[in-house]
Amino acid sequence: MLLQSTTKVSESVESSESLTGRHAIVLKNLGFRRNGLLLFDGLSEQFSAGETTCILGVSGVGKSSLLRVIAGLLPDPEFGSACDEDGRSLRGRIAYMAQDDLLLPWANVFRNVTLGCRLRGDDIDDDNARELIQLVGLAEHVEALPHTLSGGMRQRVALARTLMEKRPIALLDEPFSALDALTRYQLQSLVAELFRGRTVVIVTHDPVEALRLGHSIRVMYGRPALLSEPMRLGGQPPRDPTAPKVASLQRELLNRLGISPAEV
């Protein structure tokens, strides 16, 4: 069973006030060009503090680029900025999980999970690292190298590494895209539990995933790209995808995406 008891780890992960303070993401007149293409031109938006925002949109519209700009992984914007709601830099406040697991092939599971601590020269909380590895169902593989793991297992290592960072803001880019249906469902529940109270932005192509995990959903569209008004969902994630209200919201979301239910 993948999803272990989360009580002990969630308490230790979320015990610091710094994880659940007022850490909204504010985009101020953001302008960014990549490979000569203007992706964003004066984009001004805010992602609410302590909530999960899911972003959907067609491939290539700029979803992943937006996360990487916010995370500081691309060159500085041509103009504007991404900052906290108090105007301070987001540097040092973000944990980022890419579409690819980005595991070091020569490092075992434990060393990959604790990579950030080792790169910064921080003390490593061995107990917390092993608790997270157990929580994602990899306790028996703590010494395993990445090439011996399945794609889903590697994705779980990347998730544990992201949690190990203990940052108040998490940016997750298609974190479950390579997983089978059951593992995806279980990891969605795990993310909803362990990132609760933090400011989270998830890029996904899956409307049901967005409805399970988001407090709000934004659709990215156009060139330069814009974000739709938030679709507020109510209640706390993770939601039951078979619930009648979620089914109704799915119809509304498909309409926002320009998809007729008959096309699904």
Image: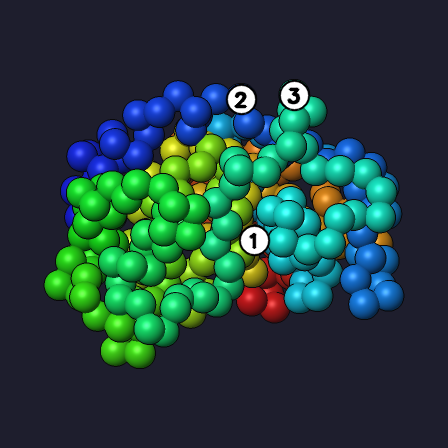
User: What residue is disc 3 on?
Assistant: 86
Q: Residue at x 39, y 68 (%)?
A: 104
Q: Amino acid at mark 3?
A: Asp
Which label was assigned to residue 38?
A: none
What distance separates the C-alpha of mark 1 from that of mark 2? 22 Å
Q: Residues within 10 Å of mark 3 (few under 14, many from 20)?
A: few
User: Going from the N terminus, do you reach mark 2 or mark 3 first?
Assistant: 2
Say if 66 sits above or below 103 in the image.
above
Mark 1 belongs to which amino acid?
Val
Q: Circles 2 and 3: CB distance less than 8 Å?
A: yes
In the foreground, 136 or 120: 120
Residue drawn at x 75%, y 38% as measured from the top left: 81
Q: Position of residue 176 (x, y in %)?
A: 42, 61
| Placement of the C terminus among the 4 image quadrants | bottom right
Read off the residue under disc 1: 203
User: Type of residue at label 2?
Assistant: Arg
Of residues 182 and 168, the one drawn nearer to the viewer in this rendering: 168
Left or right: residue 25 compared with residue 186:
right
- 218 sits to left or right of 94: right
Residue 135, how many percent across, how many down? 21, 49
**Depth check, front residue: 213 or 38:** 38
Q: Position of residue 259 (x, y in %)?
A: 66, 60
User: Is residue 163 among what the camera can see?
Assistant: no
For the point 15% across and 58% down, which residue is it?
139
**Residue at (44%, 37%) from the top-left corner?**
167
Q: Quadrant of residue 231?
A: top right
Which residue in the structure is indicated by mark 2? 22
Secondary structure state at the residue bearing disc 1: strand
Judge by depth and name the residue closer to the eye, 94 or 209: 94
> Mark 2, residues whose alpha carbon is within 10 Å: few (<14), some, or many (≥20)?
some
